[in-house]
Amino acid sequence: MAMFTVKVNAQDNDPNMGIIPAPVSIKKTPGEFVLSRETVILADSVNNKAVAFFADYLKNKAMLRVPLKANVAANKAASSVVLTSAGTENLPADGYLLTITPQQVILAGKGAGLFYGIQTLIQLIPADRAAVVKLPCLEIDDYPRFGYRGLMLDVCRHFFSVEFVKKYIDLMAAYKLNNFHWHLTDDQGWRIEIKKYPKLTQMGSRRAQTLIGGYYDRTPQQFDNTPYGSYYTQDQIRDVIKYASDRYINVVPEIEMPGHSLAALAAYPELSCDSTKTYKVAETWGVFTEVYCPSEKTFGFLEDVLSEVIDLFPSKYIHIGGDEVPKDAWKQSVFCQNLIKQLNLKDENELQSYFTQRIEKFVNSKGRSIIGWDEILEGGLSPHATVMSWRGEEGGIAAAKQSHDVVMTPINQGMYISSPEEKSKDHAGQYVTLQKTYSYNPTPAALTPEQQKYIIGVQACMWAENLNSEIKAEHLLLPRMLAMAEVGWTQLANKNYTDFADTRLPRHLAMFDRNGLEYYVPGAIGTKDTIMFGDRLNVNLKPSVTGAKVYYTIDGTDPDKTDIEYNIPVTYYIPADQYRELKTIVITPAGNRSQVTRAIKYNTSPLKPVNIRSSVNGLKYKLLKGKFNNIQELDNAAVIDSGIVKDFDLAAFKKNNPSFGLIYTGYITVSADGDYGFSTQSSNGAVLLIDGQIVVDNDGKHRLFEQGGVIPLQKGVHKITLKYFNSGNRGSIKLFETPPGGEKAELSPATLNN
């Protein structure tokens, strides 16, 4: 299994010397240290697993045969790398000190701290080295912001090989993540061998077929008619746990309960509230009403399962799920209703709390602690549970206020990295940009400093409904995993997105490119999809991957390697009432490509206000009949309804028309001359026009995506036209405005006139 190591060259304009995640303190000093075959590694313990990792890296990756010796006086050398725990008494947990002088490298750390220092040292080894390695002289004092820095992998919706899991762990280790959350059971498959219950893997690990595409993509739904499934043997799990442990990564197993249990019920229907029903491993995504019944048989089964899980996994935390538990089966069950009365519970939410507390007592009796999704708060939180807040920050805030430990992983804050980074018609859910992931701060302002201490960490989640290949998972993981690593490690005051994305990240992406990893290639630095106004188009670009090339066009065609290669800044002057369209693409040495970015600049005078008075709130609309692929198709469509709306709620339009078009018209009043920013956030196509001029082009079939543009306006009233088409059940539309020098705010039809 390959070790993933990053080698970056320090430059004066890079205060963090290329290191990801950025350290607490870094001081550059004169000179360089030459690492060669004359160098000796001196270690307090030559058998330390962090030391062994470094020695193996130098031998098999850097191709340097550097002898490893005990750190004793008899072995002192003129050129040495000293790996020691001396001087670490006052270091925070997992911290390290790295000092490089022309004569010596001293890395001081204990346990995981020494390993993290080694990862930093490896990142400092230049990519273009020769027979020797030259390291810049410096002093680093570093330690993590949070103790829990996690990454989750769902292996139930789609299965991932042991080899891929190890690659996942290698990448985590390279960026100082320390908790691998292994989502092992769900409705769509049971993935862990349990000796006492063989049918869990004989039957529960395989589904008869799988939904094609997203849940709402096709009506009626279509399936691939192909059996699917696999599982990990206990020997394979032990192998993964040791592999992770050698890289100072804890493996947190997740056994879902009481919901997301359909795979288990397919194998053992007697664990349900109605054993006469036939259950099968789920073939679609979503939430299912079939859940465990809170019977003694079920608790006996789960205790047996957890006993084997706890024997396998040394993790302090055992994840018991607890999310998305429909109460339908419990409401219809005579047994459950009698149990609620017997236990003097208020409702089914408290019954779930009883279920969770029963499991917690058992897990605690084994010397472990439970962690669960934030729904375990409902009905009362178990006494010692740790909460993983995913539906937003609210669950984490509530748990911290009750003095419970919290791991933040909110879906709406860039922590669900199974969503695409770019506008996509092929992927369900909202896109999640690199900047959104990077910008997350896991300590909410709603908590006092004392309460914030209960936020023990942060985690990114990789759900697998749409991951039908390991390559796709890798593409979604990178580079957002690096952004998440900096969220978890780097002190808030040291975070800087421009430094991260424009200065340090390109070299790490170049490493991925050299090593054949699949990763998302960001667009060229210095441009983005937008509409602008002015009399000149400045082309000042930088490749998003070190060593890559940027190609561009100004004639509206998509660029390729046969088009203009960017080398130096260029300015294109735009005559009055004309425009220039800049399209760019990044192509890496390995042939990987970014999406094409499109920036349009118009040389148009500020638009004059229209001479109209309108004080009637709301926008007029026309509802158009048809199935549309782009906004242009709306022009010749039949109008089937019209009226005035005060919001952009599409529910009424969707009742009888899963596919339709809408044209909203009205007027917006601006209070001052200036450049106004607008954006639309829509599922499927949307185009915004002001006074007939296109300002936002968010056209085409796609999932939820926000697109913006800027237009100069004179003070007064301006005509606004918003065109939209809906395709499927998840369509939505929102409109935003950013006035000159002001804050971005959502616009609703109620704030506009017609």
Image: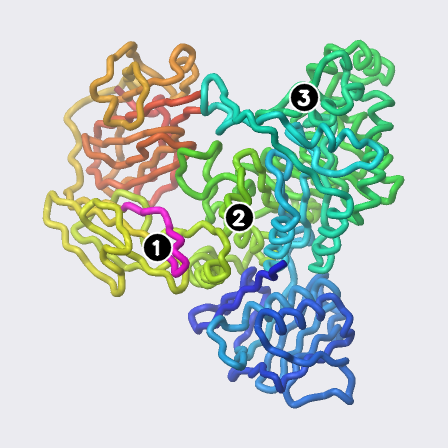
Q: Residues within 10 Å of mark 1 (few under 14, many from 20)?
A: many
Circle 3: element type: loop
Identity, as a three-letter code, of the amino acid under mark 1: Val
- The residue labelled by disc 2 is 474
- The residue labelled by disc 3 is 280
Magenta portion: prevailing SS class: loop
**Residue sitting farthest toward the left:** 576
Residue 586, numbered label: 1
Q: Alpha-carbon distance for marks 3 and 2?
A: 30 Å
Residue nearer the viewer, 443 or 166 = 166
Q: Is residue 270 left or right of residue 226?
A: right
Residue 593 colored in magenta in the image: yes
Q: How many labels sit on residues?
A: 3
Residue 344, numbered label: none
Give percent across and percent down for residue 687: 28, 31
For the point 32% across and 19% down, which residue is it? 627
Residue nearer the viewer, 525 or 379 = 525
For the point 33% across and 48% down, which residue is it? 528
Identity, as a three-letter code, of the amino acid under mark 3: Lys
Identity, as a three-letter code, of the amino acid under mark 2: Glu
Circle 1: element type: strand
